[in-house]
Image (cartoon, grey):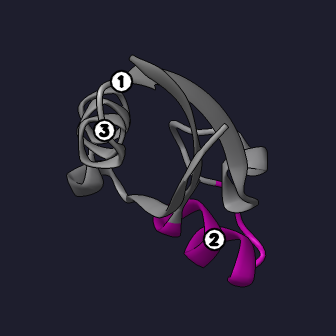
Amino acid sequence: MKNYEVAIYNQKVRDALREGDSHPNFSDDWGEINYITFLAGSPEEARKRAENKHPPDLGFVVESVTEL
């Protein structure tokens, strides 16, 4: 198992901020890239863990996965 840094943001938050509004459920800081570390066996597994915790259908976008 290795540590992977996942860069993730929320597109729905970005869209709301662009319109001068805030998202009703997520803080404005999700409009920026957040870096979260996941312990996983591969970059694909780290991405899957990130997407399970922060689902794409709620607007989350994984921008990159980097081995630490």
SS state under label 1: strand
Residue type (three-letter) at the residue carrying disc 2: Arg
Q: Residue at x 48, y 23 (%)?
A: 2
Q: Is there a contact, CB below 8 Å, between mark 1 and mark 3? A: yes
Q: In the image, 26: left or right of 32?
A: left
Nearer to me, 38 or 58: 38
Q: Residue at x 25, y 48 (%)?
A: 44
Mark number, residue 14: 2
Which quarter of the rendered picture does the C terminus lie within?
top right
The dominant secondary structure in magenta is helix
Q: In the image, 35: left or right of 65?
A: right
Dot 3 or dot 2, earlier in sequence = 2
Q: Report the residue marked by disc 3.
A: 42
**What is the x, y in percent for residue 47?**
33, 45
Dot 1 or dot 2, earlier in sequence = 2
Nearer to me, 29 or 51: 51
Residue type (three-letter) at the residue carrying disc 3: Ser
Residue type (three-letter) at the residue carrying disc 1: Ala
Q: Residue at x 76, y 60 (%)?
A: 32
Within-10-Å neighbours for mark 1: few <14, some 14–19, many 20+: some
Which quarter of the rendered picture does the N terminus lie within?
top left
Cα distance in 3D space between marks 1 and 3: 6 Å
Q: Is residue 64 above or below residue 20?
A: above
**What is the x, y in percent for residue 18?**
72, 82
Q: Report the residue marked by disc 1.
A: 40
Cα distance in 3D space between marks 3 and 2: 29 Å
